[in-house]
Amino acid sequence: MGDNKAPRSNRFLDNLKSVLESLQGIGSMRKKPEIEINKPGKGPFWQDPRYNWIAYVILAVLLLSLMQNFQQMREVEIPYSQFLQYVEAGRVDKVVVSDKKITGLLKPEEPEGRPQPFFTVPLWDANLTELLQKHGVEFVVRPETTNWIAYFFFSWFLPLLLLFLLWSWMAQRMAGGRNFLSLGRRARIYAESDVKVRFDDVAGCEEAKQELKEVVEFLKDPKKIQRLGGRPPKGVLLVGPPGTGKTLLARAVAGEAGVPFFSITGSEFVEMFVGVGAARVRDLFEQARQKAPCIIFIDEIDAIGRARGASPVSHEEREQTLNQLLAEMDGFDPTSGVVVMAATNRPEILDKALLRPGRFDRQIVVDKPDLAGREAILRIHTRGKKLCPDVDLHVIALRTPGFVGAELENVCNEAAIIAVRQGRDCIADVIPRVCLGSGALWAWAGSAI
């Protein structure tokens, strides 16, 4: 019995060692600098993210192998009478006789099968030794020495530990490399010195800037409005089409006021784990209170702020997150210096409780810029760029009706790229390239030549 047990134990230890080495290798790969990991072909192949699936397959195979070994290592109890029948039939390979039980291996019925461990509670049988010798069964007599610590470790503790390590590793990957026990912390925090944007860097939305200047005054002097018996705003909702500069305006408010800026998108609140979104909301407001006065900016708030009950499908996690957000906005003191700003391009789908006074007190429309706004935006995005003498930003603004700030920035960037491609020393007008595509650009360039 001892000779047969050793190879099985060695095989189990080898499998365990392989699993631990795989987990250690994956952990060490995650500790490499991000630049090195994300470059395909850099370093050994096991650090290449394109081969991550190999690690997953190997880990799954090893875990299945371990589970199979645990299954096979379980001893099956058989009656003593059946044990005697197996001995007479030549099915018993080796046995170990102790005070309380007889353990051994049953030969498989099929040639390709594996031996099955068994045990039986013996009776006082003086003929047992003679019976085993008669049928050529190798046997060993030894006292009962059950190691319950080793049994508990290999049978219960080790499998649970491996499952816990696998779960924590998967949770850590889903958390973006963060500690899985701190899934609530997802907001990006920008200190006062990190926010470089000012109102001078924002153009095309003068009305919105004028309203937001009052928020800046409140952040600079929270008690100014209280002297007149007023209540400072708790929340500001920026509404407008994509690319009009809502996020840029929020950064400009933080930059002008010189306060920390917490930025997070609505989709980052919701995860597959129920309750994580609400935990992130609580953590976000707790950090904000510690750094007040400050600004919390939630981009694309419609991801969590949809009207509850609008869909027949239940979204429990999203609704819990929204309820926690409503409770936090009601709970903090308006004089604490925390202003919540949010942006959306779909205000009609937001929950009415989110838009009532006391939460988002102000809704500021950030619309597409007019002619003067487009020209001002072009002047901002051409700062530091060498323009050709014949470039007229007013003419470009006339030729780009309906363009938002992001599209005008793309116009300036495309102009710089084409100037480099053509070997120019200055940036020329490339409106046909942006509006109509590269084919129109070549036709326009050919007609100009």
Image (cartoon, rainbow, N blue to C red):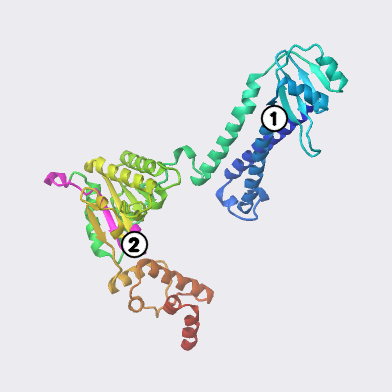
Residue at the location (72% across, 12% down)? 99
Residue at the spot of label 1: 73
In terms of depth relative to the viewer, which is nearer, 70 or 414? 70
Q: Is residue 136 above or below residue 215?
A: above
The region drawn magenta spans 224-248
The numbered dot on residue 429 is none
Q: What residue type is labelled 1?
A: Met
User: Is residue 191 or residue 86 the one in the foreground?
Assistant: 86
Q: Is mark 1 on a helix, strand or loop?
A: helix
Relative to 6, is 438 on the left or the right? left
Mark 1, Cα crowd under 10 Å, few <14 / some 14-19 / many 20+, is some
Query: Which quadrant of the structure image shows residue 237?
Result: bottom left
In the rendered view, does 444 fall on the left or right side of 392?
A: right
Q: Is residue 228 magenta?
A: yes
Name the one closer to the observer, 409 or 333. 333
Q: What residue type is labelled 2?
A: Gly
Q: Can residue 130 be seen in this view?
A: yes
Query: Where does residue 170 sit, x and y in percent of width and height?
Result: 54, 43
Q: Which of marks 1 and 2 is nearer the N terminus?
A: 1
Please, what secondary structure does the residue beneath circle 2 have? Answer: loop
Asked whether, in this view, residue 69 is left or right of residue 109, the answer is left
Decide if residue 437 is on the left or right side of residue 252.
right
Circle on res. 245: 2
Q: Is residue 1 visible?
A: no
Measured from the top left, where is residue 38 in percent x and y? 58, 53
Number of numbered discs overlaid on the protein picture: 2
Please say if 237 is above or below 89: below
> In the displayed structure, would residue 299 be above or below residue 143?
below
